[in-house]
Amino acid sequence: MSEGLYEEQARGRVTHSLLRLGTAMRSQAWEWAESVGLTPTQGEILMLLVQRKTPLRLSEIARETALTAATTSDAVSTLEAKGLIEKRRAFDDGRALAVRLTARGRSAAKRAQQWPEFLNAAIDKLGDDEQAVFYRTLLKMIRQLEVQGDMPANRMCMSCSHFDPSKNARKVPHRCISFDQPIDNIELRLDCERHVEADLATQKRIWKIFSEQA
């Protein structure tokens, strides 16, 4: 088998496996959402709001969830009618509206965070090293999807000005300047509240080190 054909088949198998995982996640999301009277989209918005811990504008919710403005507006209106969220004037712009969770919404959001628990049983079958390698690989894939414009940018360590990458994280951990603490690969954050986006040159340097590290 030629090298090109082998690579094509390997890529196809990885893609097919990811699609099957997506099918399982979509099925589980709908099953959970229907059991609590929500849709997966509504559950995702609740989880986003509880993770961010701050009111978000409709445009921010649409960007973070990769939803259309119309879909976001419909989902938010439904959540508001259910008493799970409320709209208030944005702190930084009195002309704009921001969405925040109500007390009932926070409870619902915490329940929404539990639906992916079915994945934990499968992840627990992986060893510690396998989980670390898997997570690092996922971060690299997510980064590439961001670059391609197929996924909203995440507030991850590797695009943050506070991140000091290590060329060999197994021997010398990375370091977060903001938290003033060492972090290894499995501790890297995908969504950090202290994230400050680094300039493009710094991001390229960080990703080069991260991609080539031992």
Image (cartoon, grey):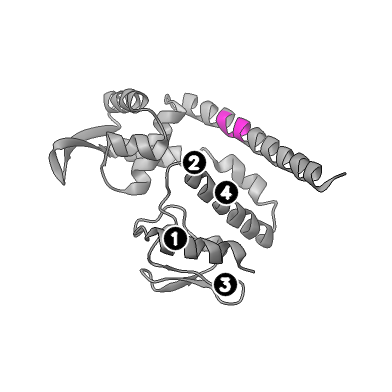
Task: Residue type at mark 1: give it.
Answer: Gln
What is the span of residues highlighted in magenta in the rendered image?
Answer: 22-26
The mark nearer the N terminus, 1 or 2, is 2
Q: Position of residue 18 (x, y in %)?
A: 64, 38
Circle 1 residue = 203
Left or right, residue 39 beside residue 13: left
Q: Mark 1 or mark 3: which comes first in sequence?
A: 3
Question: Could you say where residue 42 lies in the image, as x and y percent from the top left?
Answer: 39, 30
Residue 182 lies, with reference to residue 6, above or below; the image says below
Identify the element where label 1 is drawn.
helix
The residue pinned by badge 4 equals 141
How many neighbours does mark 3 have within 10 angstroms: few (below 14), some (14-19), or many (20 or more)? some
Q: Residue at x 64, y 46 (%)?
A: 121
Crowding around mark 4 (Cα neighbors within 10 Å: few <14, some 14 to 19, many 20+) is few
Q: Amino acid at mark 3?
A: Lys
Q: CA distance from mark 4 to mark 1?
A: 15 Å
Q: Residues within 10 Å of mark 2 (few under 14, many from 20)?
A: few
